[in-house]
Image: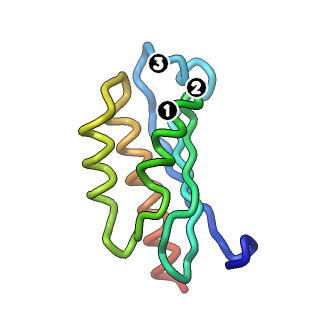
Amino acid sequence: MDKNDTIICTGYSRLPDGMAAKNLYGVMGVGLEIDPKTDKVLNASSTFITSMCTDFIQSIFEGHDLKKGIDTPVELFERRYFGLGKKAIVSAIRDAYNQYSIYKSSV
């Protein structure tokens, strides 16, 4: 697969007070790099401050088939993440998926 054929869908949401990321970014951002031919997530990133948390997001989404929806990785994230902003992060994830759904309906 040619990397020039991938797309990136991003989602954003407001962070609660008390999160370090809010002081830097103001919002939580989640990005998904997707192969639109297979609907698989190739890479994922976020505006978490620590690389560990960004790696965590990536480990949950990398390889996920978006034809199956987003509920399974969201449930996995919710079951394993315990920190401020959980709802905001889930909202950003769902927003990124929504952007992909919009893209798929337009092609």
The answer to whether the residue labelled 2 contacts the one labelled 3, judged by CB atoms less than 8 Å apart, is no
Label whose residue precedes the other's in the sequence (2 or 3): 3
Q: Report how far apart the C-alphas of labels 1 and 3 lie in the structure.
A: 13 Å
Quadrant of the image containing the C terminus: bottom right
Secondary element under disc 3, as helix, strand or loop, is: loop
Q: Report how far apart the C-alphas of labels 2 and 3 lie in the structure.
A: 9 Å
Depth check: give the residue in front, 32 or 23. 32
Disc 2 crowd rating (10 Å Cα; few below 14, some 14-19, many 20+) is some
Q: Report how far apart the C-alphas of labels 1 and 2 lie in the structure.
A: 8 Å
- Colour theme: rainbow
Of circles 1 and 2, which is in front?
A: 1
Task: Give the x, y percent position of residue 57.
Answer: 46, 43
The circle on residue 53 is 1
Disc 1 crowd rating (10 Å Cα; few below 14, some 14-19, many 20+) is some
Task: Give the x, y percent position of residue 84.
Answer: 36, 22
Task: Give the x, y percent position of residue 27.
Answer: 52, 33
The residue under the point 53% across, 23% down is: 22
The answer to whether the residue labelled 1 contacts the one labelled 2, judged by CB atoms less than 8 Å apart, is yes
**Label 2 amino acid?**
Ile
Q: Is residue 45 left or right of residue 83?
A: right
Secondary element under disc 1, as helix, strand or loop, is: helix
Task: Indicate the quadrant where residue 15 lies.
Answer: top left
Task: Indicate the quadrant where residue 95 lies.
Answer: bottom left
**Label 3 amino acid?**
Met
The circle on residue 87 is none
Q: In this view, does 15 lie to the left or right of 35?
A: left
Q: Find disc 3 in the rendering and name its residue.
A: 19
Q: Find disc 2 in the rendering and name its residue.
A: 49
Quadrant of the image containing the N terminus: bottom right
The residue furthest top is 18
